Amino acid sequence: MFDLKGRVALVTGSTTGLGKAMAMHLGRAGAKVAINYANNAERAAATLEEFRAEGLAGDIFRANVTDHADVTRLEAEVREKLGPIDVMVLNATPDQPIKPIEEYDWDFHQSMLEFFVKSPFLLTRAVLPGMKERRYGRIINIGSEVFDRGVPNFSPYVAAKGAQRGWTRSMSQELAPFGITVNMISPGWIPVERHENDPEEDKAAYLKLIPVGHWGKPADIAAAAVYFASDEANFVTGQTLVVNGGMTVN
């Protein structure tokens, strides 16, 4: 089960955190993986070295996934080096400061929409011709539990993630006749590198709320991505899988 040999997967924002875990797991399942980054070339090189040390197939690709020209170039480069993209995981994300609405401006709201609405739109438009021709594709959005929980002092991020979920639902219906599934994974708070300096009291307070009683791991999200990417998920589309230890119940 969950054999991805012969598939090509692109994971945006995948040199650290959840994106890196998903890229590694997709590679371990047999996919050739396009690892994407925007700025930190040193970290990207280290990730690729780790990837290849496991004997996994793939390569690294630099692109700003909110820029039309970069997305067009990215799709062409992945297709040339690895083959047509079969699986696309939309994971890239900017910083997410928590503060009241009075301290946000519209430019920040716009930056959230750039990552979680514009980027999925641009990337999907880029890969659709090939997916439709092959009548096969897997589009996996990475959402967040914040939409279900309505987290306060986080309104631009919550709103953009809600828009991303709505886009997932609509696209799943539009693309289903072409053999293309569109699903979303919504993680809870899973501490990764960018959470290293988060206050320990905040972490302790959140941990107390998790019904299963322990933190989630990046591998938990990666396993969900492998499932959605696989042939075993062929009859599943338009769904949101919330991976947060029972913090929310759908």
Image: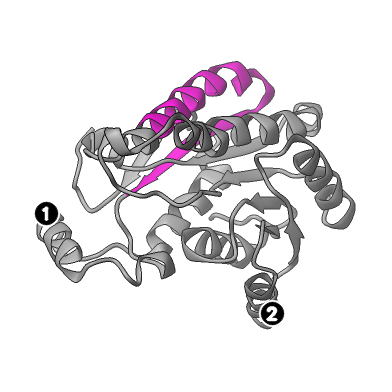
Q: Which mark is residue 97?
A: none
Element assignment for label 2 = helix
Up-down relation of residue 230 to residue 135 (above or below): below
Q: Earlier in the sequence, mark 2 or mark 1?
A: 2
User: What colouring style does the render use?
Assistant: one colour
Q: Quadrant of residue 88?
A: top right
The residue indicated by pointer 1 is: 209
Residue drawn at point x = 67 percent, y = 56 percent? 38
Give the image location of residue 85, x and y in percent.
75, 44
Q: CA distance from mark 2 to mark 1?
A: 38 Å
Up-down relation of residue 42 to residue 94 (above or below): below
Q: Quadrant of the C terminus?
A: top left
Left or right placement of residue 122 versus residue 223 in this view: right
Span highlighted in magenta in the image: 159-187
Give the image location of residue 179, x and y in percent.
65, 27
Q: Quadrant of residue 160?
A: top left
235 magenta-colored: no
Up-down relation of residue 246 to residue 27 (above or below): above
Query: Which amino acid does the dot numbered 2 rest on?
Result: Glu
Give the image location of residue 68, x and y in percent.
75, 35
- Asked if one can make out residue 17 in the rendered structure from this viewpoint, the answer is yes
The residue indicated by pointer 2 is: 49
Query: Which amino acid does the dot numbered 1 rest on?
Result: Leu
Element assignment for label 1 = helix
Callout 1: few (<14), some (14-19), or many (20+) C-alpha neighbours within 10 Å?
few
Left or right placement of residue 61 versus residue 176 in this view: right
186 magenta-colored: yes
Callout 2: few (<14), some (14-19), or many (20+) C-alpha neighbours within 10 Å?
few
Dot 2 and dot 1 residues touching (CB under 8 Å): no
